[in-house]
Image (cartoon, rainbow, N blue to C red):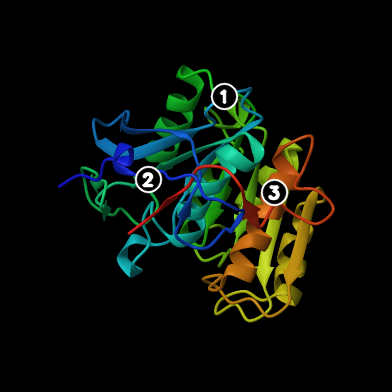
């Protein structure tokens, strides 16, 4: 069965509650379908603020699907649970071609980051067509390769403000793609875990020196998958700081919530 985000049951606590991995804050959530130029139908979810203006839009590109990556990879799931309520940020998540999650399975099959170009373009086009403002690519692991390869060239480049990369391995993305980002002048923030399995901060600083406007942050103690609430929360703080005018605040996003909330299974 396809998961229905309307099935979350919200309750009003008597006192503020700690925001945990399974805490779902209020948002307008809908299952979506995105059709690519080569005819594939991709499944996803769009989470919007319940009210007020949308401060930014995240178009998320998930980790490698052949190694367990999908739209529900935990940092993106937490972004969709929290950021519409805490920061007014819209979160668009989707499964690239051939990828399966509780939402369903996107048509097609894994194409090593080549055919996925159409997936990136289609997701950005969907966000534009829906009138979602201040659009940013957010890539994680394999998703950073897609952001780097296709985010600084048309038709994507003119439709996004910039990109945020989580744990970039730089396996498929090359110096050519880095130089395209440099030439675009678009902001690029790179979060590199201290104990990453593929690219650690010192080497990342050397590789990304090709992009003068890149802002690289090494995160002490973190690993490639950002496991642990401490590290997931740090990622969300950095994202909100980059994409919104107000930012996450001096102490980061709130770690407690006093309004209605649900608990994910």
Q: Which of these two is toward me, 52 or 158?
A: 52
Q: Which of these two is toward me, 129 or 6?
A: 6
Q: Is residue 109 visible?
A: yes
Position of the C terminus, as image quadrant, is bottom left
Instruction: Judge from the rendering whether residue 261 lies leftward or rightward of residue 65; answer left or right.
Output: right
Front disc: 2 or 3: 2
Marks 2 and 3, Cα distance to the nearest angstrom? 21 Å
Marks 1 and 2, Cα distance to the nearest angstrom? 33 Å
| Pointer 1 residue | 51
| Pointer 3 residue | 179
Marks 3 and 1, Cα distance to the nearest angstrom? 40 Å
What element does badge 1 sit on?
A: loop
Place residue 56 in its image quadrant. top right
| Pointer 2 residue | 116
What element does badge 2 sit on?
A: helix
Residue at 51% x, 21% y is 128
């Amino acid at each position: 069965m396809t998961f229905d985000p309307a099935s979350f049951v919200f309750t009003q606590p008597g006192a503020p509650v700690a925001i945990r991995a399974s805490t779902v804050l209020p948002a307008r959530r809908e299952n979506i379908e995105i059709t690519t130029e080569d005819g594939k139908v991709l499944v996803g979810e769009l989470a919007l603020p319940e009210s007020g203006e949308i401060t930014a839009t995240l178009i998320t590109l998930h980790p490698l699907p052949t190694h367990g990556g999908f739209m529900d990879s935990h940092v993106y799931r937490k972004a969709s649970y929290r950021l519409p309520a805490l920061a007014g940020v819209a979160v668009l998540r989707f499964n690239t071609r051939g990828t399966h999650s509780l939402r369903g399975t996107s048509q097609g099959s894994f194409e090593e980051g080549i055919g996925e170009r159409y997936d990136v373009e289609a997701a950005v086009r969907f966000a534009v067509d829906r009138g979602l403002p201040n659009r940013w690519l957010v890539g994680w692991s394999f998703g950073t390769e897609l952001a780097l390869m296709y985010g600084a060239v048309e038709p994507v480049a003119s439709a996004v403000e910039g990109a945020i990369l989580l744990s970039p391995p730089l396996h498929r993305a090359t110096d050519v793609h880095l130089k395209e980002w440099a030439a675009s002048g678009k902001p690029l923030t790179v979060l590199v875990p201290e104990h990453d399995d593929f690219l650690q901060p010192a080497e990342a600083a050397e590789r990304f020196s090709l992009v003068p406007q890149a802002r690289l942050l090494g995160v002490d103690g973190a690993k490639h998958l950002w496991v642990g609430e401490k590290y997931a929360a740090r990622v969300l703080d950095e994202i909100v700081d980059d994409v919104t005018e107000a930012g996450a605040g001096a102490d980061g996003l709130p770690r407690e919530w006093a309004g209605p909330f649900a608990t994910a299974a």
